[in-house]
Image: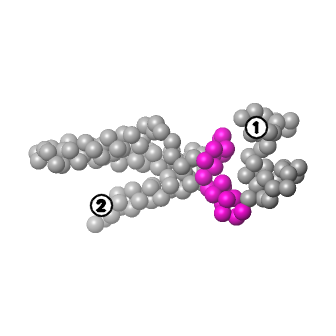
Amino acid sequence: MRPNVAGRPCFPGGHTYAERVTGASDTSSTKAAPSLPVRWANWLFRSRIDGKITVAQFPNLALGIFLACLVIGFALGAFAADASGLRSAVDVIGTLALIWWALDELIRGVNPWRRGLGLVVLAFVGGGLIRGVVG
């Protein structure tokens, strides 16, 4: 994005993010403002960085580590009966990677969807850890 006259980031055509989502600066056309569901979807999924719809992004190191640990843990459980210590280490690494991913999304997510997803995953993992310690 390039800065506009006021120094704020703008999209092609000179529109700011808010103008692009709401259609507020488009006074020359007879096009109606976006409907409520469209505005809601834009707010939820549109990246605050580049204005594109963003649901998931790859590559993601933390999520990749978690998925690798998931596959390795499954393989160890299915094919190696005496690998309980190694399986526990893989589970801990996978859980830490998932917490890392969730915190990263919660703090640096590019839109509310990504931040909310990080919060839900963090709550789910935290609940599982508490259930494992208490019960």
Task: Pinpoint residue 14: horizontal percent, then vertical percent.
Answer: 81, 39
Task: Pinpoint residue 107: horizontal percent, then vertical percent.
Answer: 56, 47
Give residue 33's quadrant in the image: bottom right
Q: Residue at x 74, y 39 (%)?
A: 11
Q: Amino acid at mark 1?
A: Pro
Q: Residue at x 39, y 56 (%)?
A: 125
Task: Pinpoint residue 94: horizontal percent, then vertical percent.
Answer: 33, 45
> For residue 88, which numbered disc appears in the image?
none
The magenta segment is 35-53
Q: In this rendering, which labeled residue sits more in front, label 2 or label 1?
A: 1
Give the distance between the C-alpha atoms of the residues marked 2 and 1, in whole angstroms: 51 Å
> Which mark is first along the chain, 1 or 2?
1
- Residue marked by disc 2: 132
| Residue 17 vertical placement versus 37 (above, below) | above
Label 2 element class: helix
Let me know if residue 43 is in the magenta part.
yes
